[in-house]
Image (tube, rainbow, N blue to C red):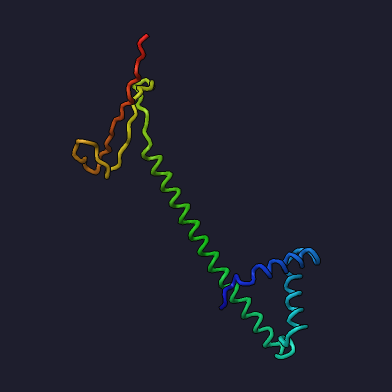
Amino acid sequence: MANEEQFDGVLLGLAQQITQAQGPGIDPLLNTFLGFLRRKTDFFTGANPEQVEAAMLKSVRLQLSIAEKEKAEKEKARKKQAEKKAAESAKKKESAPVKAKTADGRDTGVEIEILNDEDQVENEPKANSNTKEVKQKQKPAKKRRRK
């Protein structure tokens, strides 16, 4: 099959002109093209009606098959992208620092990070897989200005 997009500009211009002259929809475009085949070629007169219909159906089925494959590929890519985005979002949410609070609910000013079993706390051996590790992050002390 030749480069499918080779005649896109011409065909798009034709479709726009037909839409302006005859109204929107695929039927005017198909009728114009088939009318051209009838008037300027032997497509309809050089073969029996069964051969004409078979040729048309063959082309339609080919294009339907291609369209279905492309649609399935796009859907697969969309799902893969959505899964990737969800995984990244979950990972961000999972690794976001949490503010530590006192027993009565007041903010302590200390941020902690919940680590996965695969993560390792600095300067500490890895814990067993049944425990969660917590690493504290101290906020830098504010510098006081002298008057």
Residue 38 vs residue 79, the one in the foreground: 38
Q: Is 71 left, or right, of 101 in this rendering?
A: right
What residue is rendered at 53% in x and 68% in y? 69
40 relative to 80, above or below: below
29 relative to 121, above or below: below
2 relative to 102, above or below: below
Rendered-image quadrant of the N terminus: bottom right
What residue is rendered at 37% in x and 8% in y? 147
Total marks shown come to 0
Where residue 121 appears, as percent x and y from the top left, is 24, 37
Q: Is 118 left, or right, of 14 in this rendering?
A: left
Q: Is 57 left, or right, of 122 in this rendering?
A: right
Q: Residue furthest front?
A: 147
Q: Residue furthest right?
A: 21
Where residue 23 appears, as percent x and y from the top left, is 79, 64
What residue is rendered at 29% in x and 30% in y? 136
Where residue 66 appears, as percent x and y from the top left, is 56, 71
Where residue 24 appears, as percent x and y from the top left, is 76, 63
Residue 34 vs residue 96, the one in the foreground: 34
Q: Quadrant of residue 26?
A: bottom right
Q: Quadrant of residue 114?
A: top left
